[in-house]
Amino acid sequence: MSSIAELPICVLGMHRSGTSCLAGSLEQAGVHLGEVVNKSPSNPKGNKESKVQRGINEDLLAFSGGSWDKPPEQLRWNSDLQARRDSFIENAWTASPWGFKDPRSLLTLPFWREALGDLRFVATVRHPAAVARSLMSRAGLQPKMAPLHLWTEYNQRLLNLCQTETVHLVSFDWHQSEYLGALEHLFGVLGLTLPEQIPFFEKGLRSEEKLWPDCDQETKTKAEKLYSDLLQHTLDIST
């Protein structure tokens, strides 16, 4: 049985919510992410995702009748998906601490936990309006589901997890100094090496705009409430 310090680190969060920044910062603190995307047109520093794992997640969601932007009602998988998952874990988990990041994992988490068992969860949340605007501004990334509804689908799962498991949650909306302080605190909690600096985070990685897209009041109120509830679970670095 692995000790807590040896458990894999799973980075969770909605798309456009700072998961790449969080994963990249963890990598700089010594977390092995394996072969990941380190540069892309939309993210000069890379999204820190394994193309292999992302492909498994995409095929798993499709097998279940859904996609990243249309979460399936029920997750289903077969022996082929299990074999691909187990092969990925065997090839990726070559050092400790090891971790992985793909926003789709919020939708596919039961599938991964079947093979990995216990995990250490780190996660990020971002204001729903900022995420919606970010999604809408991305060429070729217009989601099938309305952005705010999609934000709610992902983050309700994150809140459910926070209410039942230990999740080290940060907010991508925090001021730069507060965010970097939370990362340093997180590194200590996870037993990671504190880097001399955390250059992965840059203010330019995010937009400060939080203008609500066109939506009905009920949708907005539900998202605001969920966001407020999640903030209650963020890291307390005052102690």
Image (cartoon, grey):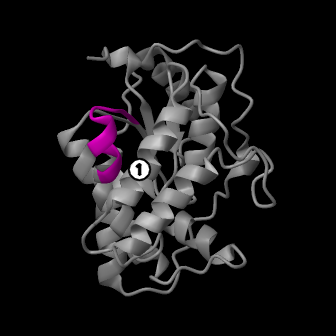
Residue at the far left in the pictured view? 164
Q: Is residue 114 magenta?
A: yes
> Taking the image as drawn, is residue 106 in sight?
no
Q: Is residue 148 magenta?
A: no
Percent x, y of residue 50:
61, 47
Task: Please name the residue shown 41% across and 77% down the image.
Answer: 70
The one of 141 and 89 positioned closer to us in this rendering: 89
> Taking the image as drawn, is residue 130 in sight?
yes
Percent x, y of residue 94:
55, 24
In this rendering, the count of numbered labels is 1
Q: Quadrant of the C terminus?
A: top left
Find disc 1 in the rendering and name its residue: 83
Which quadrant holds residue 143?
Answer: bottom right
Up-down: is 224 above or below 164?
Answer: below
The one of 119 and 136 positioned closer to us in this rendering: 119
- Disc 1 marks a residue whose amino acid type is Ala
Residue 73 shown left or right of residue 107 in the figure: left
Up-down: is 45 above or below 64?
Answer: above
| Kind of element beneath mark 1 | helix
Up-down: is 103 above or below 142?
Answer: above
> Magenta span covers which residues?
111-121
Task: Please name the residue shown 54% across and 65% down the image.
Answer: 131
Q: Quadrant of the N terminus?
A: top left
